[in-house]
Every structure is written in structure tokens, then in C-alpha cells.
Amino acid sequence: AGLQPEIGNNRAQLSHPIAFERLRVRATDPDESQTAVDAARVELSPGPLWSILFDQGRFFRAFTIQSVRAVLDLRRGHNRQRQLAGQANEREQRTQKQRMLRWLPEYVGIQRANLEVLAPGQSYFFEDVSADFSEERLGEFRAVGAEIHAGPVNQSLGSLKGTTAWKD
């Protein structure tokens, strides 16, 4: 299923972060995927142009998202990725990962998010999440609460706090 973005406002100036306000993303086929994201603000900080063009560097240094409500539906994509993984040999998989890594920012920040992740036979809900993930340092993860539904496990959790470590 494809995704349809809607942007309330955007700002892009040379050598400044690209900012999107009132960003909405919806699955184009709701029968195929329940993926939906509403964010008050999203910022992408581009990597150095020289590095992108000549050194195969990252396209983005940082990605931050604020005041988010999101449902990420991984159920259909999971089956498709399993099929593709079985078709690609190890060298092709390594090349695909290297290409994908260029799109992965060095830093990700999430502020005030309610996240629901749907996967085959399981779902996870995190309330009021704030987290940062950095390749340069340890980060933090905080959530007011969480719910886990995976097979026979149905668990509600209270306040969560942890440390994050992000590496390519």
C-alpha cells in the first residue's frame, strides 16, 4: 500500500533544516494498511552537500518529530519483506542495506508521541513518548505508559524510562 502525505506548511532554506508543520500521512488503501501519522512539526536537517555528492554520505543528519499520533501497520510489509529477503543473495542484501543507510539520519528525536505498532499477531501501544537516538552518544526513552498484546501476553505497563543506543 502506498502512503499519501498532506503538509499544512513547509519551510526550506539553503543550509537550514527543512520544516513541515501539520504533517499528515495516510495509507492510500485502508483495507491494505492502517498506517496513519499526524505530527504538529517535523524537521529534517540535511547532511553536508559535499559528503552527499562525493562521499556517499547520509542525506540527513537529524530527524525530529513533535506532537505525534501514529499507527504503524507492519503486517502486510512483513510478508513482502520475507519474500524479498528470500530472493536476494547476501551481496545484494548488503548493497540494499548500504543504500538504505544513506537515508537513515545520525540522530532521531521524538517529542510527545502516542505510537501504536501493529505487527503479525501482535500490537504495541506507547503513550506520551519522548526519545532521542544518536550515533554519537547514549540517548533517553520515556513513556507515560505502554500496552503489549502478543499472542497470550496482554500486559499494561506504567511509566517507562530507559537508555537508547543507536548505531548504523
Image: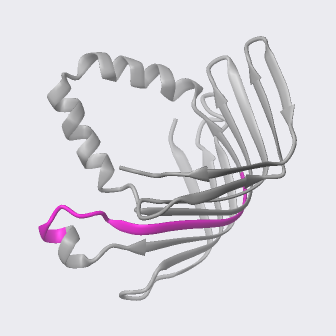
In percent of the image, x 50 and y 66: which residue is there? 63
Taking the image as shown, residue 153 lies to the left or right of residue 163, namely right
Magenta span has 65? Answer: yes
In percent of the image, x 24 and y 77: which residue is there? 49
58 and 40: which one is in front?
Answer: 58
Quarter location, residue 30: top right
Q: Indicate whether 64 appears above or below 116.
A: below
Quarter location, residue 67: bottom right
**Which residue sits furthest left?**
54
15 and 110: which one is in front?
Answer: 110
Q: Which residues are magenta?
A: 53-69
Taking the image as shown, residue 50 lies to the left or right of residue 6, namely left
Residue 96 image point, x, y percent: 25, 39
In percent of the image, x 23 and y 64: which residue is there? 57
Q: Indicate whether 91 appears above or below 22.
A: above
Residue 167 image point, x, y percent: 40, 50
131 and 82: which one is in front?
Answer: 131
In percent of the image, x 32 and y 47: which residue is there? 100
Taking the image as shown, residue 62 lies to the left or right of residue 58, namely right
